[in-house]
Amino acid sequence: MNRNYQLGKEKEVEEEEDPRGFLLPALNAPSVSVGVLESIYTLAVTCIVEAEEEAEAEELLLGSGVGVGPSSRFFPDSPAMEGGGGSSDVGKRVYDEEHSYVEVPETAHEISKDSWFQAAFVLTTGINSVFVLGYSGTIMVPLGWIFGAVGLIAAAAISLYANVLIAKLHEFGGKRHIRYRDLAGHLYGKKAYSLTWGLQYVNLFMINTGFIILAGESLKAIYVLFRDDHEMKLPYFIAIAGFVCALFAIGIPHLSALRIWLGFSTLFSLVYIVIAFVLSLRDGINSPPRDYSVSGTGSSRVFTTIGAAANLVFAYNTGMLPEIQATVRQPAVENMLKALYFQFTLGCLPMYAVTFVGYWAYGSSTSSYLLSNVTGPTWLKAIANVSAFLQTVISLHIFASPMYEYMDTRFGVKGSALKIRNLSFRIVFRGGYLTINTFVSALLPFLGDFESLTGAISTFPLTFILANHMYLVAKEAKMSSLQKSWHWLNVCFFGCMSVAAAIAALRLIAVDSKTYNLFADI
């Protein structure tokens, strides 16, 4: 009687607190003790409440445009979360290294698809692009053996440090910053966003200009090997190079789609670097003693030295590290650091080899395009120049990809790259962008001056000034006074270097403009 009365009272309570009736069958079972029933009841109600709260949280996230489905909770590394669907990534989140949610911004291009090794090859392609054939003349000649060699090694160490700072901020503040300007805007606001985008655009535009000039020079070198009649001028070859670059840009929709082309790029780089190295080494062994003195006196030598320092930082830095890091799969920071360590160790060796041997072989007479100095079989030099031209086409696509991503995202280019609308869009917009690039390249084909000016007005601010200051702003609360002083010292030093290098580069352009006409055949 007493037990029946007790169960009856408990049943009334359960009906009030358990309206769904989940527990009534269990409560009516006479073989189950009251203590066990209470434990079961408590566990069940807790699970129900947690499930309802989680569902409400998901509905709020979905309502704000951020979907967190089952794959994101239990399979954070699954393809659905890794990005890769272009604009389908809108509203998704990924896990960072600390297993917290990181928001993925909207983009029309694929992200989070590539291994760190592919990112390393993208970086290595940039550092061993055809520009390496000019460093003997644009860095070593104005600096000499001691300052040139020490400068290259020191610039590598400083550049690695600055790039590591940027890579570590990739997922700062719960967002994945897939664009350099996004990171600056997150830390400083809209004005910094616009300023950073302007600096980056100038940096990449001028790098692309240099690539098209080099591609034109490669084609002209091939022509001169077989027909030295001077009927075809450099501007004509620059126009041809620009057209080929546009065709490649139309056919490759985004940075991750390069894949196999990065293998070809590495092969082409090895071909012209090995040929230039071997032929320079042979010429150096068979040549009389060379002159390694640094020409110029007084102010002209100072300006030349400062311009060469700008070329040093230009040699290592892309100005688009967040855009490259965006293609790397999770964990993005850890994988990008692996790619950077590869770039600044094994990736630098070919550049060092051809730069030092080229300067050793020809001394102060080394030109800004090493293949113009070497002597050897015509067919071998032709292969080197063809490889240089083809590698330039691939490298330019890497440095133009932020602009392509901006245009594709801005105008909502989605779906298959072969769709008529998407293909037409790339023909018009990418073709138009490279037409302007090609026109500027033909108008002012002063390669060394472009390297100096690019390093001064964009590479210094983006890679060194902003990198140190953004890291200071983001991590200030965790820094000691000594660490803060170190970052401020870097900001001030590279700020002064940027101003001085810009003045030196503008002076060089003014001097060359007096020497060469517009659309010069140099």
Image (spheres, rainbow, N blue to C red):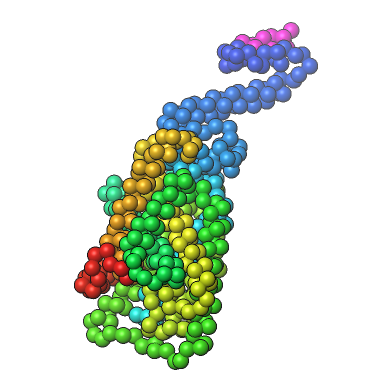
Residue 49 drawn above or below residue 284: above
**The stretch drawn in magenta includes residue 188:** no
Q: State the image coordinates of residue 16 (x, y, percent, origin top left).
A: 57, 13
Work out whether residue 62 or residue 276 is closer to the camera in this orientation and state it: 276
Give the image quarter of residue 162: bottom left
**Which residue is located at x 60 percent, y 27 percent?**
46
Q: Residue lying furthest right in this view?
A: 31
Can residue 6 be seen from the camera position used here?
no
Q: Please identify the quadrant where the N terminus is shown.
A: top right
Can residue 378 be seen from the camera position used here?
yes
Q: How many numbered discs? A: 0
Q: State the image coordinates of residue 26 (x, y, percent, origin top left).
A: 71, 16
**Which residue is located at x 40 percent, y 58 percent?**
241
Q: State the image coordinates of residue 318 (x, y, percent, origin top left).
A: 41, 60
Residue 354 drawn above or below residue 234: below
**Which residue is located at x 33 percent, y 51 percent?**
435
Q: Residue lying furthest top in this view?
A: 1
**The stretch drawn in magenta includes residue 5:** yes
Work out whether residue 467 or residue 436 is closer to the camera in this orientation and state it: 436
Q: State the image coordinates of residue 160 (x, y, percent, origin top left).
A: 46, 66
**Which residue is located at x 48 percent, y 53 percent?**
325
Horizontal side of 302 relative to 181 (left or right) equals left
Q: Please identify the quadrant where the C terminus is shown.
A: bottom left
Q: Which residues are magenta?
A: 1-12
Give the image quarter of residue 515: bottom left
Magenta region, mostly helix, strand or loop? helix
